[in-house]
Amino acid sequence: MRDGFVSVAAVTPEVKVADVEFNVESCIKAISAAVEKNGAKVVVLPELCLTAYTCGDLFYQDALLNAVEDGLAYLVEKTAEFDALILLGAPVRVNAKLYDCAVAICGGEILGVVPKQVVSTFNELDEGRYFSVGQDDVVAINIAGFDDIPFGVRQLFCCDSLGSLVVAAEVGEDTMAASGPTYGHASAGATLIASLSASCAIVGRAAKQKVILSAESNRLTCAYVFANAGKGESTTDCVFSGNNLVFECGRLLAEAEPFGNGIAATEIDTDAIAAERRRVSVFETAADPRLDGYVRTVFSLGISETKLTRAVDAHPFVPDDDADRTARCEEIFSIQAHALAKRLQHTRSTRAIIGLSGGLDSTLALLVAVRAFDLLGLDRSGIIAVTMPGFGTTGRTYNNACSLATAAGAELREISIADSVRQHFYDIGHDEADHDATYEFALARERTQILMDLSNQEGGLVVGTGDLSELALGWATYNGDHMSMYGVNAAIPKTLVRHLVRYVADTCDDEFESGVLYDVLDTPVSPELLPANADGTIAQQTEDLVGPYELHDFFIYQVLRRGFTPGKVYRLACHALGSEYDKATILKWLKVFYRRFFSQQFKRSCSPDGPAVGTVGVSPRAALRMPSDAVSALWLAELDEL
């Protein structure tokens, strides 16, 4: 299955300064290892690796340059059977000038020669002494026995079997300089930029390179494969470490340990890069003169399903690092609280009405309301926390709701819905013993009616509690808990809701409140619409009915944020969560996700306002513009074929 993943490797071969024969053999050996051991389809070697970067005035010697031409011809012949695009560094003579170049090779052919454009003469660098500045315009040259080879900066190498794999090459300071060709390459369509470097090891330089490559790959929505010269280059005053790196859209996927084996190998997702570019229009390509004159050379690779070695985040909404997660939680709380404070201010409301069930979502809504009231300098007693016990309410959730309201300083009101729902059953002729959808939804709608009427009575704002995961699945009663006057959790997935509540529990100064919050976290997720078990425990657990939220949140991210096909979502889920769920279970709940996601759009189309928090949301105004009657057949058919 072709799913856009391409194995890549940045490789630093062992070299000897000015020993071209040795270096050529070493490069062939390194390329062979990358292809055969790592399955690499794109192999990038360092700048001037056929000679070594540190040859100095030896670059004036025809003996060295003649050896490069002979060695390059030999290397092209010996790598002809490798199913890979190879980019390596060599000095190239053109019209009595010498250029520091990246040579692109595939299938026994030289595809193109890309000269370095930013020739540096500062610090230890004296490149201008030997090398001329590469020009944008592409001309034809003869090199190493090959005629009419494209030569110039504006070149792209396009894979015929994977349209989203478009490769550009940069040399040395081209990548790091503000005036380099990077923007033009990406804007012209390059999804992968091969950066051939010979940057000597100076304290702090490697960290700076990481920052720049991360920022550039994020800004330009592309991958970077950065291959740097290694310890064999070290001579006179310069030392090289072979700190190779692979980035994708700002994320570091692989790196070679400095002074280590010199291999950074992983997979990049070219389809994801292309999809992200379609989503976010960051490139003004139509009238940009920097895009004129690009030459596109097609190459062939056998692209099939790529073995994944890269990490796939099982919980894409929740940072793994404790410090990052804490910072993320605080930032989200601030967004939610300031958003609610603005809505309260605008509506001149000094009251907020919250249905407090003792579950995760309503707990988070209460915590947000408390912070919003504190921001506005309002008395917390203006928060009316309403517990509405019904036929499915357990003592555990009831007690937690009451305790939370008290700890928060909110006004607690208890309004039983049992009698009013029984009257409603009588009015519509429904048997109370029939625990069907009518039974469940009547309870949910009665609670919402109470909250809305209280808001009119008190001049307050009904704060919604439903989260992103529930909205994506349509796991809400239409015009019941689906409705509010402001949904503070609407962009928070269930897995993140849990961490937000835990964050407050961990940082709260009130030991009693923390204890209640921890118990809420340990309580199974349930709407409590069906009668409790005989022992008083929760009978209706949401994840038994709709599936694990851990899986659904993973699906939500891959489908809504990444736009991946069902087959790719399934494959990634198996890779990321296969130790927790077997393939049949993942496939079962993925089908449920697609069915519910499509069929329940009508609920999202009329959902209330709520603060956008991240890059994923289902608001019909700001995040997801989806027709309510869209058909899921195309997506489900792909899953049926797995």
Image (cartoon, grey):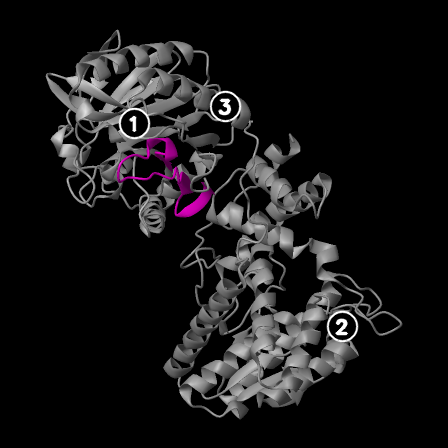
> What residue is at 71 percent from the left and 57 percent from the top?
543
Between marks 1 and 3 in the image, the one whose residue lies nearer the viewer: 1
Of callouts 2 and 1, the N-terminal one: 1
Q: Which residue is mark 3?
A: 33
Quick one: 392 or 291, which is closer to the camera?
Answer: 291
Between marks 2 and 1 in the image, the one whose residue lies nearer the viewer: 1
> What residue is at 58 percent from the left and 66 percent from the top?
499
Lateral position of residue 51 relative to residue 446, left or right? left
Lateral position of residue 215 relative to residue 356, left or right? left
Q: Quadrant of residue 436?
A: bottom right
Circle 2 sits in a helix, a strand or a loop, which is it? Answer: helix
How far apart in space, not on screen, are marks 2 and 1 (Cα)?
85 Å
Q: Please give the label number shown on residue 425.
A: 2
| Residue closest to the far left | 96
Q: Amino acid at mark 2?
A: Phe
Above or below: residue 20 compared with residue 238: above
Q: Which residues are the magenta region?
A: 225-254
Quick one: 602 or 256, which is closer to the camera?
Answer: 256
Of callouts 3 and 2, the N-terminal one: 3
Q: Few, some or many C-alpha atoms within 10 Å of disc 2 (few <14, some 14-19, many ≥20)?
A: some
How far apart in space, not on screen, are marks 1 and 3 (Cα)?
20 Å
Quick one: 396 or 594, which is closer to the camera?
Answer: 396
Location of residue 59 in the rendering, given as x and y in whole percent from the top left corner: 19, 23
